[in-house]
Image: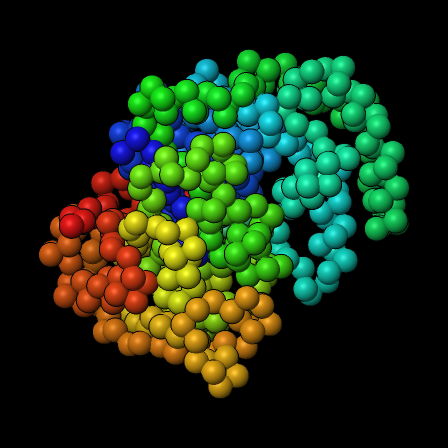
Amino acid sequence: MPATSVIGLQWGDEAKGKIVDLLTEHHQLVVRYQGGNNAGHTVKFDGRTYKLSLLPSGILQSHVTSVIGPGVVVNPLALLRELDGLAEGGQDCSDRLLVSDRAHVICPWHLAEEAALEKSRGSAAIGTTMRGIGTCYGDKVGRSHAIRIGDLVDADSFAAKVREIVPFKQKILNALDPDASQLDPEQIIAEYAAAADRIRSMACDTTTFLLDALDQGKHMLFEGAQGSLLDIDHGTFPYVTSSNSSGCGIHNGSGVPEREIQHMIGVAKAYTTRVGGGPFPTELDNEVGEQIRIAGNEFGTVTGRPRRCGWFDAVATGYSARISGVDSIAIALLDVLSGLDELYICEAYDVRGTVTRTLPSRCEDLAAAVPVLTRVAGWQEDITEITEFSALPANAQEYVRTVERIVGRPVEFVSVGPDRAQTIRMNLN
Ligand code: GDP
Ligand code: IMO
Ligand code: MG
């Protein structure tokens, strides 16, 4: 397939990194198009585990050019830290990475401003990753105080912008928090200029690069970050991230027209997790939730926070599949459910007496939603070595088929462990 995409259908951490890694061998380009270093994608093969945050998951494969598109927000220091970490482990990848000169730059004031805003919300905090993602996107939309990669790598232009922006930001920070940190523009310029010297050779017009690559018949893979329910327009606002993390973001975040994407795969866990605040109708705030958290090692890749766990929500996942128009789904972490006597799948919500099969627009309504659950019998066997669907316990097969039926999209992959090899590929008719 010339252009394929992989997106998350839940609230992130669905195992997108694993599925992207699996598909990478058939692609020459892997593209991140939204989000930033709030993402944490795990790739595991040959006994090694890699945790990628800003870098596309294709970066580990030498035949791939990895692209960070215009819709991504880039913290240059974090980008270099990540590249250096890989180089220390024997993987020097900087010569196969391109960064859009249109991508926006996360600066120290974005982190400081986010810390003050989150603090001001008290118990209603969004629970962000504190990476300055939302505040950087805010400045991008606001335009006046925005800096792009193209500005960063132009030393004079960058220094002038920092000297102009810092006094404005300091006033805002002081007003938000009397204990706000004091920004030193010259120190920021020096630190970022050193990073810019290393990023300059990677910075380019990735949009034209990708469009030319399509003309040349190259195969590209789009790697979504976060999940569709965290989408700024279509997710559980305001408990969302600040980009279009559903399939809707691919076109605007990369510059590649939607119609070029022949195949879109939506990834979902066999249950549901969420990190941070916000409504979660199928949440299991009990022993079963704890059992899933431990079996699935459900602790944030980026922040280490325990993830909230719950039953598979086919209403929310089905909504995500519809808004992005996914062709197929990958069900991951099915092995985590082994050992539970009974499993439940949410097929509708009861919102104050009205039964609905779609995601309410307002998070107040979602918070009031009582899940209508379908029971599926569990299985006890360890399934982590199984590579054929027909070899799964009958109840596990039934579980996957029930998810498929309610979500309304065919299952293309079933993942039964973190490693590349622990994957069942289904025949799509
Ligand atoms: P991403 O953000 O969507 O790429 O997902 P994360 O990497 O944040 O979280 C997924 C976690 O599940 C990682 O630790 C993976 O190594 C792990 N994982 C992926 N697939 C499976 C699976 O099928 N079974 C189990 N047990 N773990 C998996
Ligand atoms: P990957 O790509 C899970 C969540 C945060 C918070 C909300 C807003 O690994 O699936 P932000 O820092 O983006 O402003 O935080 O979004 N969040 C994620 N949750 N996986 C992610 O990425 C996430 N990226 C952001 O926890 O609730
Ligand atoms: Mg993750």
Nearer to the camera, 78 or 256: 256
The location of residue 410, given as percent across then percent down, is: 24, 55
Q: Residue at x 75, y 18 (%)?
A: 157
Q: Is residue 169 left or right of residue 33?
A: right
Q: Quadrant of residue 204?
A: top right
The location of residue 363, given as percent across then percent down, is: 58, 68
Task: Tell me if I can see residue 407 in this picture.
Answer: yes
Task: Tell me if I can see residue 81 in this picture.
Answer: no
Residue extending farthest bottom = 353
Q: Quadrant of residue 260?
A: top left
The location of residue 152, given as percent across then percent down, is: 68, 22
Q: Residue at x 49, y 43 (%)?
A: 249
Q: Residue at x 73, y 60 (%)?
A: 121
Q: Residue at x 69, y 65 (%)?
A: 123
Name the quadrant of the N terminus.
top left
Q: Against 335, is 154 above or below?
A: above
Q: Against 178, is 77 above or below?
A: above
